[in-house]
Amino acid sequence: MAGKLIIFSAPSGSGKSTIINYLLTKGLNLAFSVSATSRSPRGTEKDGVEYFFLTPDEFRKKITNNEFLEYEEVYTDKFYGTLKAPIEKQLQDGYNVVFDVDVVGGCNIKKYYGERALSLFVQPPSVTELRKRLEGRGTDTPEVIENRIKKAEYELGFANKFDKIIINDDLEKAKEDAFETINNFLNK
């Protein structure tokens, strides 16, 4: 039986990756969607594992051939996107595919797959709390944090376009809420 799709979007620092990693261990027959990028591999990254690595020209050709569910040119010649073919293969193999994408990509994937997809928006309790989390990571400069906050304010405007909003003010509760929502969706 063909699988279903679960789309996660959220501002950086909302806990989305933590929730997804938890769900991958919960026996829901989930497969993670591997994105494509035109950037070079970093460190030990391998093609087809962390990303599908394409040159900017290869990426543009695939755009022209309508091979993406969604894509974005984040910076000049720096593309990110979701290829259709690997997703279709995962679905045909019976997996339920999980996406970790930006809000626009999430909306596009939901529009493409309709009722076969469940879209979830992970929301921090407030922008103030989000700022605290980003600062608490200790990985970003104040300038990067300001940019992430501005982007988060923009992204929060998309929350109502998703099937379900999960407010992450308590991580354990948010994980259970996500699990219950997805389990119900997969069993309908």
Image: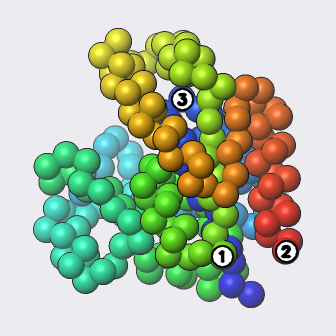
Question: Circle 3 sits in a helix, a strand or a loop, which is it?
Answer: loop
In what quadrant of the picture does the C terminus appear? bottom right
Residue 188 badge:
2
> Quick check: marks 3 and 1 in contact, CB under 8 Å?
no
Say which residue appears at 47% left-offset and 50% top-offset: 103
* Residue type at tag 3: Gly
Near mark 3 (Cα within 10 A), the count class, few <14, some 14-19 or many ≥20, is many
Residue 110, horizontal then vertical, whole percent:
55, 67
Residue 116 badge:
1
Eyeballing the image, is 167 above or below 114?
A: above
Residue 13 badge:
3
* Residue type at tag 2: Lys
Near mark 2 (Cα within 10 A), the count class, few <14, some 14-19 or many ≥20, is few
Query: Gap between marks 2 and 3, in whole Å?
Result: 31 Å
- Precedes in sequence: disc 3 or disc 1: 3
In what quadrant of the picture does the N terminus appear? bottom right
- Precedes in sequence: disc 1 or disc 2: 1
Residue 87, horizontal then vertical, whole percent:
52, 74
